[in-house]
């Protein structure tokens, strides 16, 4: 945009808590500038009234929509009047669109972002080729598992310190999803075609048990090379970082929010520069 906000300026943003660290405004505003849109994308932190109150206040107003990050993705789905199939499968929404008629529509582009990141970082990877191991049993793990199942993964094993929580999620996702404690992870890792960390800090699992063709991904992008990815790199495994997923989920979000294609610019370079400055 030109730098002047007017009544005609399109407004969108990202909501989370904390949200000040998010690279989403940097990425989306770079695309906005490249597309020469009269628009702005901002970070929003819900007040004491909570996320549901924020979503209700933005209903039918000037906001085109919100990307949603932790810890509000489940609340975002609950706040919607309608939801896409992938949002329902994930049990969460990372995108809310505010219809001009007042409806709130929920979607989830996280799975699309995860698969796009894997396709870019590990071009030979096929989700249907074999089992997947996902570390964690929270919303991020649910979204990853739902996306992989939809893409044809024949089996998913959830590794989590709280086995009870992993069992509950596995039961919810279906018979091809099972749960394991970290102590029982080596046998699963040995068979896995992809190992994904969906926790803020990956548990210390034996990556040396992984086969030579396994792909290792971390959803975390601060730091870009986590200790989990560093261990995988040292073993010569193919790795995919969380920034690739962030950009992958942002692309369909941008198109939905601003009803225009994503400009072909190097937003990864922009994001890497910001990460470097913040390190």
Image (cartoon, helix red, strand yellow):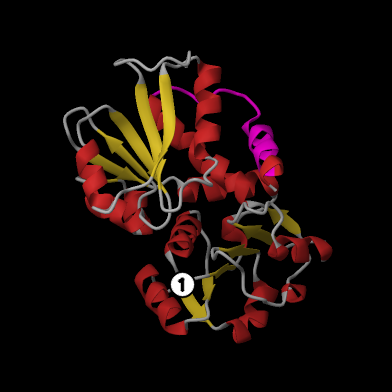
Q: Position of residue 99 (x, y in %)?
A: 23, 32
Q: Compared with residue 256, is residue 55 higher up or lower down, i.e. above or below?
A: below
Q: How many marks?
A: 1
- Quarter of the image for residue 257 reads top left
Residue for point 42% across, 62% down: 139
Closer to us: 273 or 66: 273
Q: Position of residue 143 (x, y in %)?
A: 44, 58
Which residue is disc 1 drawn over? 176
Horizontal arrangement in the rendering, residue 230 relative to residue 242 (left or right): right
Closer to us: 179 or 246: 246
Mark 1 residue element: loop
Residue for point 41% across, 50% down: 16
Residue furthest to the bottom: 183
- Residue 195 among those drawn in magenta: no
Q: Which residues are magenta?
A: 259-275
Q: Compared with residue 154, is residue 110 higher up or lower down, i.e. above or below?
A: above
Residue for point 63% across, 37% down: 271
From this viewpoint, is residue 65 visible? Answer: yes
Q: Compared with residue 174, is residue 263 higher up or lower down, i.e. above or below?
A: above
Residue for point 62% across, 32% down: 267
């Amino acid at each position: 945009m030109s730098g002047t906000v007017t009544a005609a300026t399109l407004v969108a943003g990202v909501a989370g808590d904390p949200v000040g660290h998010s690279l989403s405004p940097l990425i989306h505003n770079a695309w906005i500038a490249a597309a020469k849109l009269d628009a702005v994308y901002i970070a929003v932190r819900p007040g004491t009234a909570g996320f549901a109150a924020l979503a209700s206040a933005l209903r039918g107003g000037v906001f085109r929509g919100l990307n949603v990050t932790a810890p509000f993705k489940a609340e975002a789905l609950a706040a919607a009047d309608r939801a896409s199939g992938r949002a329902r499968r994930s049990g969460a929404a990372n995108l809310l669109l505010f219809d001009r008629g007042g409806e709130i529509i929920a979607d989830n582009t996280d799975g699309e972002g995860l698969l796009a990141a894997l396709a870019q970082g590990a071009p030979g990877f096929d989700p249907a080729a074999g089992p997947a191991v996902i570390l964690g049993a929270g919303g991020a793990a649910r979204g990853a598992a739902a996306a992989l199942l939809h893409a044809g993964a024949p089996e998913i094993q959830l590794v989590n310190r709280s086995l009870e929580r992993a069992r509950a999620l596995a039961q919810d996702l279906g018979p091809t999803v099972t749960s394991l404690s970290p102590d029982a992870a080596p046998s699963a890792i040995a068979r896995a075609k992809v190992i994904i960390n969906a926790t803020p800090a990956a548990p210390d699992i034996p990556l040396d048990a992984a086969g030579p063709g396994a792909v290792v991904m971390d959803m975390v992008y601060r730091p870009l090379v986590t200790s989990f990815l560093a261990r995988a790199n040292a073993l010569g495994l193919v790795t995919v970082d969380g920034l690739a997923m962030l950009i992958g989920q942002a692309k369909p979000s941008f198109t939905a929010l601003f009803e225009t294609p994503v400009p072909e610019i190097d937003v990864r370079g922009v994001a890497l520069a910001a990460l470097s400055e913040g390190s």
